[in-house]
Amino acid sequence: MDLLERDDLDAVLITTPDHQHAFEAVHAANLGKHIYCEKPLTLTVPEGRAICNAVKRTNVAFQTGSQQRTEYGHKFVDAVQAVRNGRIGTIERIEVGIGDPPIPCDLPEEETPAGTHWDRWLGQAPQRAFNHELCPLGVHGHYPQWRKYREYCNGPFADFGAHHYDIAQWGMNADATGPSRIIVPARDIDGTLPNRGLVLEYDNGVRVEHGGRSGITFHGTHGTIWVDRGGLEASDQAMLNDPLGNGETAMPRHRNHLHNWITCIRSGDKPVANEEVGHRTASMNQLAVIGYEAGESMQWDPRAERFIGVNAANGNARLARVTREGWQVPGT
């Protein structure tokens, strides 16, 4: 944290593993530093709200690394623009095709290599022994596996879900809210809960479903639009190709994600993936993971950010996680 105290430091980029984001972001915001933080923004709902509160107090420019809002040839902007302008009619459901929920870390113990600051890598996560799959050494040829494990990330589900659920939320124009119901899938004949099929349902009836084709598929009363980094398709291409008409709104288009952030540092405007955007998207992932782990459908109050009704106690007990001494995120 000594680095953050420097008077000649105006902004920081947080690119540490997910479980360290909140601790670093809150401290940086409290010291008045502008922040670009990689996604998924946090592990828990209280961590995300703590970041939002710190940013509000200090009025720094905060950008979540959800680059699909600004880059990839503006495919996602085109899709959201068409959906927001009603070209598929009223949204009924959205499919999000991504990976599995997290699993507990069960990697074997290895000797900590000399020069590896393992305690610092663990941060707030539970104490455990070193394993090279979590913290690769030097230049490596594999994708670090810490993203699979709930102690450090909310699984492949949240790793790419932080991108794709973000576009689902954006398409619904729901950046400042969240679902009101978490509906878990029916169990298999042997009683096992599937790792696909969970639904986040909103008060307007839109159902965001975990599953389907890779990417995001918007289903409306008049047709569908699918978008991923590799493509953009519609049930009728005129939905995408026809120019904007009277009463239709153009979505903002930015040079790239970092440029949007730096521009906002100078102007005082909110970046396109600001702290509330990043928090609400991460919350979608976190609520879904809680649903999978609890194995129970639940109701959610997106204003109070608490579970309510039947099974609320089980859900609320899972909102926060135990952190190691000295690593408590301020404001949680």
Image: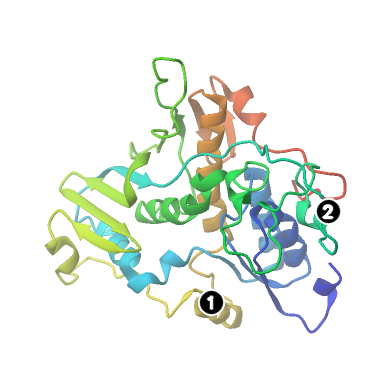
Total marks drawn? 2
Answer with mark 1 or mark 2, whichever residue precedes in sequence: 2
Taking the image as drawn, is residue 208 in sight? no
The answer to whether residue 262 is above or below residue 112 is below
Q: Residue at x 71, y 55 (%)?
A: 20
Q: Nearer the viewer, residue 25 or 89?
A: 25
Give coordinates of residue 57: x percent, y percent. Answer: 71, 62
Give the structural element (helix, strand or loop) at label 1: helix
Q: Identity of the amino acid at label 1?
A: Leu
Q: Which residue is drawn at 80% across and 48% down?
A: 328
Q: Residue 240 lies in what quarter of the image? A: bottom left
Residue situated furthest top in the rendering: 190
Q: Residue 14 lies in what quarter of the image? A: bottom right
Q: Residue at x 56, y 21 (%)?
A: 311
Give coordinates of residue 170: x percent, y percent. Answer: 40, 56
Q: Could you tell me how far apart the alpha carbons at marks 1 and 2 are, in whole angstroms?
A: 31 Å
Give coordinates of residue 39: x percent, y percent. Answer: 56, 58
In the picture, the quarter occupied by the N terminus is bottom right
Mark 2 neighbour class, 10 Å CA radius: few under 14, some 14 to 19, many 20 or more: few
Residue at which label 1 appears? 258
The answer to whether residue 201 is above or below residue 269 is above
Taking the image as drawn, is residue 152 in sight? yes
Image side of residue 64 versus residue 23, left or right: left
The answer to whether residue 135 is above or below residue 317 is below
Q: Residue at x 37, y 75 (%)?
A: 253
Q: Residue 321 lies in what quarter of the image? A: top right
Image side of residue 88 versus residue 114, left or right: left
Residue at which label 2 appears? 119
Mark 1 neighbour class, 10 Å CA radius: few under 14, some 14 to 19, many 20 or more: some
Give the structural element (helix, strand or loop) at label 2: helix
